Structure formats: structure tokens, C-alpha cells
Amino acid sequence: MNFSSRLLEQAVDEFGRLPGVGKKTALRLVLHLLKQPDAEVARLTGALTTLKEQIKYCQACFNMADHDLCEVCSSTKRDQQTICVVEDTRDVMAIENTNQYQGVYHVLGGLISPMDGVGPSDLKIEALVDRLKNNEIKEVILALSATMEGDTTIFYLYRKLKDFNIPITTIARGISFGGELEYVDEVTLGRSIATRVPYEREGIKQP
């Protein structure tokens, strides 16, 4: 792609670093912003700067939040004794959109993936263990993507948590293998949460 301006090329390169944004889409976004009033562009850049400087991670579940506790963990209407373990904030949002779950969450911050150099110590697994030690929990739901990394993480978590004698369940496999939660439609994901099953009975091939 040939550019008539070095400044334009630099801006396109930066937008092109975003996930799922190719060169053509990046160029389209940059040209769109150039046509906007200065106040519009300033509002966008200001929002990004404020987000980067002020975003917090919930001290209880590690979800993104504006305060020390996220809205879910601080809500008196949520079932604090049921924890749904997810990969990241996008999965929290996907499950919340189903309106089928009223417990709280625990965000791991990723999945175990030796190929990518991600091990158990890189995730918020010990923090989850501490939550079970220090709180009266009645169920842990492992709501991870139906991928090899997801299944590996589920198996590791089961081995880590089984001695607590707390029911450990997984979302029902209405989600095809290889599917990531954020891309599953709300109806399917909602049913998977509502019809979750005990991990030992699910029949997942354990690594």
C-alpha cells in the first residue's frame, strides 16, 4: 500500500496493530477520523487515555472495573457463593448478556497454553484457590472455551479444586469444539449455563 503522507502511514500502521484490523480497515478508520471535527477526535483520544490511566481490576474477581470491586462483586443481589470461572472480561460480558447467571465471576486472565508459554503461574489460579479457602462457596462453574487450551485448563483446575469437596461443573457442550464464548450466540450460551453438568460426568477427554 503506497501512502502520499508519512504521517498517514504511521497512523494506519498503529490502527493496523489492533486485533482483527487489516490495512484497508485501518486506512478507512484513519480517513474517517481526519474528516471529523477536532472535538470528536479529542473525545476519542481522551476516552482512551482515561481508560488506560484509570481502569482497575476487581480485587475479588479480577474483572475490569472502575472501582476496587466490580459492579457484580459489590452487588447484594448476586449469589456470592457461586463462582463462574472465565478466561477474560469478554466472557463475563457474554455471559451477562444471557441474563441466565446470577452468581459472581473469577477471571483467570488467559488459558494454560504451553505452546504460547502460558503456564498455571501466569493465571489467577492461586487467587481462586484462596477464594475457596476463605469463603463459603457452594459451586464452581468452569465456563471456558471449548478448545484444547480450555479443556487443559479445566482439567488442571479440577485437579486443583477437587479436594475442597465443592461441586465443580462445566457449561453444557451446546458449544462446538473450538468455539470461543464471546462468539457464541446468547441463546446457546444461556442454555449452556443453565444446563451445566458436573465435570466428572461430562465425558471430556482429559489431557
Image (cartoon, rainbow, N blue to C red):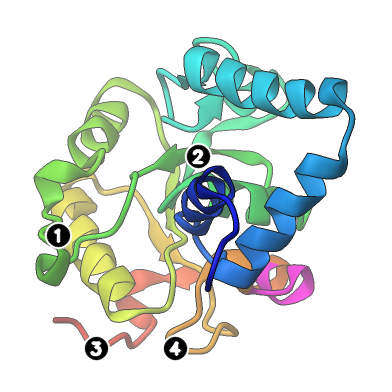
Looking at the picture, which amino acid does disc 4 mark?
Phe
**Can see residue 196?**
no
> Decide: marks 3, 2 in contact (CB < 8 A)?
no
Circle 2 sits on which residue?
A: 105
- Give the class, few, some or many, for how many residues have Cα within 10 Å of label 1's Cα (few <14, many ≥20): few
The image shows residue 149 at horizontal and vertical percentages of: 27, 72
Q: Which of 201/58 is in front?
A: 58
Q: Secondary structure at mark 3?
A: loop
Q: Which residues are magenta?
A: 184-189
Q: Secondary structure at mark 1?
A: helix
Circle 4 sits on which residue?
A: 177
The image shows residue 157 at horizontal and vertical percentages of: 22, 56
**Can see residue 89?**
yes
Query: Spatial distance from mark 3 to mark 1, Cα to Cα?
Result: 14 Å
Circle 3 sits on which residue?
A: 205
Which residue is painted at 40% across and 53% down in the image?
87
Which residue is painted at 53% across and 12% down in the image?
54
Q: Does 188 appear in magenta?
A: yes
Relative vertical location of residue 178 with respect to residue 83 in this rendering, above or below:
below
